[in-house]
Amino acid sequence: MGRIIAIANQKGGVGKTTTAINLAACLAEAGQKILIIDIDPQGNTTSGFGLSKTDIEKTVYEVLLGECNIKDAIVENIIDNLDILPSNVNLAGAEIDLIDVDNREYIFCLLYTSDAADEEDSVDLGGCRILKKKKNEGE
């Protein structure tokens, strides 16, 4: 079963993004399957992995608004074993765009639940169905 690691602190400039990028890269290098979700409107984790924030069309923002499927927004194998759900400045408007959405605090759980094809493809974490990452063929 996978683990969720959240790196959070209200103060800026304490190394959250740097820690996330380096931890994800090290775990991926060690053979762990990693999905890093950039939920910062600055998108520094996205650009830290070499993706252009301005060229990405499907980001966490579009997923939150239901404009695209979460699977379609994930950029796969930016390095071996590491996928990213990218972000950009559009995310700054999500709070206003989602003001009338019930249970918006749980939107990722709801999105993952609705995307889970069947129970074999997902695990249940406290009522939130999380998709399992498919193993590469030949593993």
Image: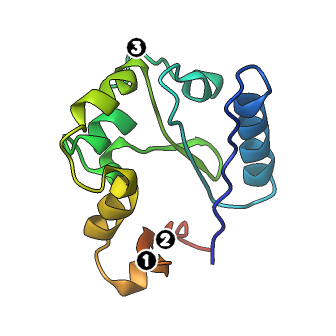
Quadrant holding the C terminus: bottom right
Give the residue pinned by disc 2. Answer: 132
Q: Is residue 76 left or right of residue 112?
A: right
Contact, mark 1 vs mark 2 (Cβ under 8 Å): yes
The residues bearing labels 3 and 2 have C-alpha atoms spaced at a distance of 29 Å
Give the residue pinned by disc 1. Answer: 122
Of the image marks 1 and 2, the number of the one nearer the N terminus = 1
In the rendered image, which quarter is residue 17 located in?
A: top right
Q: Is residue 35 left or right of residue 48?
A: left
Q: Looking at the picture, does residue 42 appear above or below residue 101?
A: above
Q: Tell which residue pokes out farthest to the bottom in this image.
A: 120
Badge 2: few (under 14), some or many (20 or more) residues near its Cα, within 10 Å? some
Of helix, strand and loop, which one carries label 1? strand
Of helix, strand and loop, which one carries label 2? loop
Q: Looking at the picture, does residue 91 appear above or below residue 133?
A: above
Of the image marks 3 and 2, the number of the one nearer the N terminus = 3
Which amino acid is tagged 3? Thr
Relative image position of residue 39 (x, y in whole percent): 50, 36
Which amino acid is tagged 1? Ser
Relative image position of residue 42 (x, y in whole percent): 52, 19
Which amino acid is tagged 2? Lys
Badge 3: few (under 14), some or many (20 or more) residues near its Cα, within 10 Å? few
Which residue is at a point 46% across and 18% down the rendered structure image? 53
The residues bearing labels 3 and 1 have C-alpha atoms spaced at a distance of 32 Å
Give the residue pinned by disc 3. Answer: 54
